[in-house]
Image: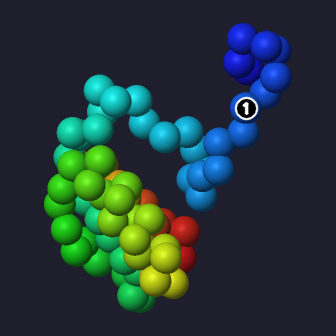
Amino acid sequence: MNSTGKVQIVDSSWYVPLPLKEYAMSRVTVYFYSERWVPIKYCSLEKAILLHQKAKLEGKEILLFPANLDPNEFSSSFN
């Protein structure tokens, strides 16, 4: 809500709130899925968000995970 009491809507494709500025330089891994999760790049969260938005505009889907998390470890338990 802003100071007038009205709710402000942010147009974002993200389903969770964008990270706070102090986390912008956190290291993440960018993955795409092709029968398993494949890491394609390590970079800052700020750059990864820009990369995600660019990929989405081109009809591609990539996901971002913390650098110390391998999605193959937990996704295999669901198969």
Q: Nearer the viewer, residue 4 or 49?
A: 4
Which residue is depicted at the point 29% across and 77% down?
38
Q: Relative to 36, is 26 above or below?
A: above
Indicate left or right for 64 with 2 as reference.
left
Residue extending farthest front: 4
Question: Where in the figure is residue 40, as x and y percent of width and height?
Answer: 22, 74
Query: Can residue 61 be spotted in the picture?
Result: no
Amino acid type, callout 1 = Gln
Which residue is depicted at the point 40% across and 30% down?
20
Which residue is depicted at the point 40% across and 65% down?
52
Q: Nearer the viewer, residue 14 or 3?
A: 3
Indicate left or right for 78 with 29 as reference.
right
Question: Where in the figure is residue 24, as x and y percent of width and height?
Answer: 29, 38
Q: Secondary structure at mark 1?
A: loop
Which residue is depicted at the point 34% across and 30% down?
21
Q: Residue tagged by mark 1?
A: 8
Question: Where in the figure is residue 46, as x and y percent of width and height?
Answer: 29, 47
Question: Where in the figure is residue 28, as x and y percent of width and height?
Answer: 25, 52
Q: Quadrant of residue 33?
A: bottom left
Indicate left or right for 77 with 47 as reference.
right
- Give the color scheme: rainbow, by chain, secondary structure or one colour: rainbow
Q: Relative to 14, is 39 above or below?
A: below
